[in-house]
Amino acid sequence: MRPLFPVGPGILRGAVVFFKQRRMETTVQLHHSHPWDLSPKEAIALQRQLRAHLRIEDDLGEVRTVAGVDVGFEQNNTITRAAVAVLDYPSLQLRESAIARQPTRFPYIPGLLSFREIPAVLEALEQLSELPDLLLCDGQGIAHPRRLGIASHLGLLIDRPTIGVGKSRLIGTHDEPGREKGQWVPLSDKGEVIGCVLRTRTGVKPLYISPGHRMGLDSAREWVVRCLTRYRLPETTRWAHRLASG
């Protein structure tokens, strides 16, 4: 059966799509390119098709930079504001950041937020001197009804390891983790472990961690822990949230 949407390198308009970096001569290839002007029904069908390409296994290489990705909205939600903050690893010192604003073109529909947010995220990534080695996205990875939250979707497009760091639960069931920092419990849906619920600060509400792409379940949790300091949010997310919120 022919896919509803052709996916793979160089699909969109029959040619490989490149986002030229503004501060260097190299280009960043987009993988699994697809149209963005889709109906909700078409977007759901595309998610089901794309999830077959996810790799929920470690494929990181050397990690020298980690980035936070977050999206906010301006002017009564008519403008999408995407922020990327790139930190050196392991120092977690800010190296560079970028903000992109675009008109909001997709409605707010839980489970389809990546179609609303990723176009602006891609524009922000285009402004960086180089793509980070690992990206922590504010939102979900495979902890998603169709296993394709924003972290998974973005990871597929740019072929980079990604992790979903959600402030709240989208789907799944879990026990309550211990109240001490570092305690965690599995997050499951329909008999499948899709992430974990991680206490990132003693006595504070936990975060919902799930692998996005090129990342295993255990490594997703471990990398979030490595990016923590004394706050609930990892440093990557804290920086990106600050930029996305203005």
Image (tube, rainbow, N blue to C red):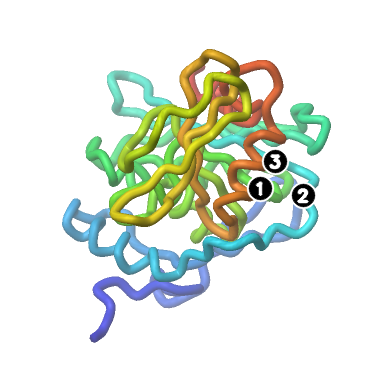
Pointer 2 local density, CA inside 10 Å: few below 14, some 14–19, many at least 20: few
Distance, label 2 to label 1, CA atoms, is: 7 Å
Q: Which residue is mark 2?
A: 63
What residue do we see at 44% from left, 37% from top? 139
Marks 2,1: beta carbons within 8 A: yes
Label 3 crowding class (10 Å Cα cut-off): few <14, some 14-19, many 20+? many
Question: Which element carries disc 3, helix, strand or loop?
Answer: strand
Real-space Cα separation, disc 1 to disc 3, in angstroms: 5 Å
- Residue furthest bottom as drawn: 1
Contact, CB < 8 Å: mark 3 with mark 2? yes
Measuring from the top left, give residue 46's x and y in whole percent. 29, 63
For residue 138, say whether it is visible: no
The answer to which image quadrant residue 59 occupies is bottom right
Q: Quadrant of the N terminus?
A: bottom left
Q: Is 183 or 229 nearer to us in this picture?
A: 183
* Label 2 secondary element: loop
Q: Is residue 161 above or below residue 137?
A: below
Question: Which residue is labeled 3 in the image?
Answer: 66
Q: Is residue 203 above or below residue 15?
A: above
Q: Indicate which disc, 2 or 1, sits on the residue closer to the N terminus.
A: 2
Q: Which mark is residue 134?
A: 1
* Contact (Cβ within 8 Å) of mark 1 with mark 3: yes
Three-letter residue code for mark 3: Val
Task: Kindly give the residue lying farthest to the top in the view shown.
Answer: 203
